[in-house]
Image: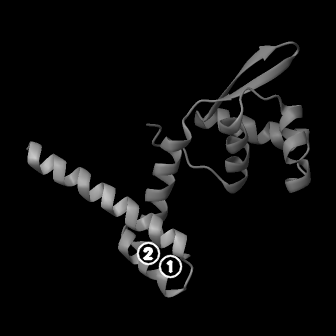
C-alpha cells in the first residue's frame, strides 16, 4: 500500500476520472472537468505532475500526447483516507461517527439497512474465523 499518498479534493477529481476510465490525455480530462471545475490545461498538468510525484499516476507517451493511468487502486487510497478521517475527526471511533450521523439525522433508512447488512456479514465472517481458530 502507498502509505504516503494524501489526495486533495481536486486530486480526487482527477483520480476518479482515471479510475473510471484510463488512459486519458490532459485534453480529455479538461473536457470532462470543464463544466464542473473550469480548470484549464495548465491547472490539470500541474495537478497531474503533483500526483505523479506522489506515485498516484504515471504516463506513457503515445501519438504525440501523454496518456495518464492511475498507479494506485481506488480501494487502497479510500481505506487510507477513511482511516485518516476517522482518526482526525472521531479519534478513530467508527461508533462515534455513526452516532454523530444518526444524531444529525444524516442517515437515510437505506443507509441504516446497508449498515445492518455490513455488520451482519462482518459478524458472520468473525464467527467463521473463531470456529477455524
Q: In this orientation, does residue 4 appear?
A: no
> Quadrant of the image for the N terminus?
top left
Residue at mark 1: 101
Looking at the image, residue 114 sits to the left or right of residue 51; the answer is left
Work out whether 21 lies above or below 83.
above
Instruction: Tell me which residue sits at (12%, 50%) in the image.
Output: 130
Nearer the observer, 57 or 24: 24
Q: Would you place residue 93 above or below residue 41 in this image?
A: below
Q: Position of residue 11 (x, y in %)?
A: 69, 47
In the displayed structure, does residue 44 sit left or right of residue 113?
right
Q: Which residue is mark 2?
A: 98
Report the residue at 55% width, 34% height from top. 72
Above-or-below relation of 61 to 29: above
Callout count: 2
The picture places residue 127, in percent across and down from the top left corner, at: 17, 54
Note whether residue 117 is visible. Answer: yes
Camera-side residue of 6 and 31: 31
Q: Nearer the viewer, residue 14 or 111?
A: 111
Relative to 44, residue 25 above or below: above
| Tag 1 secondary structure | helix
Asked whether the residues under the numbered discs 2 and 1 touch, taking CB atoms below 8 Å apart as contact, a structural biologist would say: yes
* Residue 30: image location, x then y, percent: 88, 40
Q: Is residue 120 left or right of residue 72?
A: left
Please give the name of the residue rendered at 50% of the width and 43% of the height, measured from the top-left corner.
Answer: 75
- Classed neighbour count for the residue bearing mark 1: other residues with Cα under 10 Å, few (<14), some (14–19), many (≥20): few
Q: State the residue in front, 31 or 38.
A: 31
Amino acid at each position: 500500500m502507498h502509505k504516503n499518498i494524501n489526495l486533495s479534493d481536486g486530486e480526487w477529481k482527477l483520480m476518479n476520472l482515471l479510475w473510471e476510465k484510463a488512459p486519458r490525455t490532459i485534453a480529455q480530462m479538461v473536457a470532462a472537468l470543464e463544466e464542473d471545475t473550469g480548470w484549464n490545461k495548465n491547472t490539470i498538468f500541474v495537478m497531474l505532475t503533483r500526483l505523479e510525484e506522489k506515485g498516484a499516476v504515471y504516463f506513457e507517451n503515445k501519438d504525440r500526447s501523454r496518456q495518464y493511468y492511475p498507479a494506485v487502486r481506488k480501494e487502497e487510497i479510500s481505506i487510507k483516507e477513511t482511516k485518516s478521517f476517522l482518526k482526525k475527526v472521531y479519534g478513530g471511533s467508527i461508533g462515534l461517527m455513526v452516532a454523530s450521523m444518526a444524531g444529525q439525522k444524516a442517515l437515510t433508512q437505506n443507509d441504516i439497512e446497508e449498515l445492518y447488512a455490513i455488520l451482519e456479514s462482518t459478524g458472520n465472517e468473525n464467527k467463521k474465523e473463531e470456529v477455524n481458530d
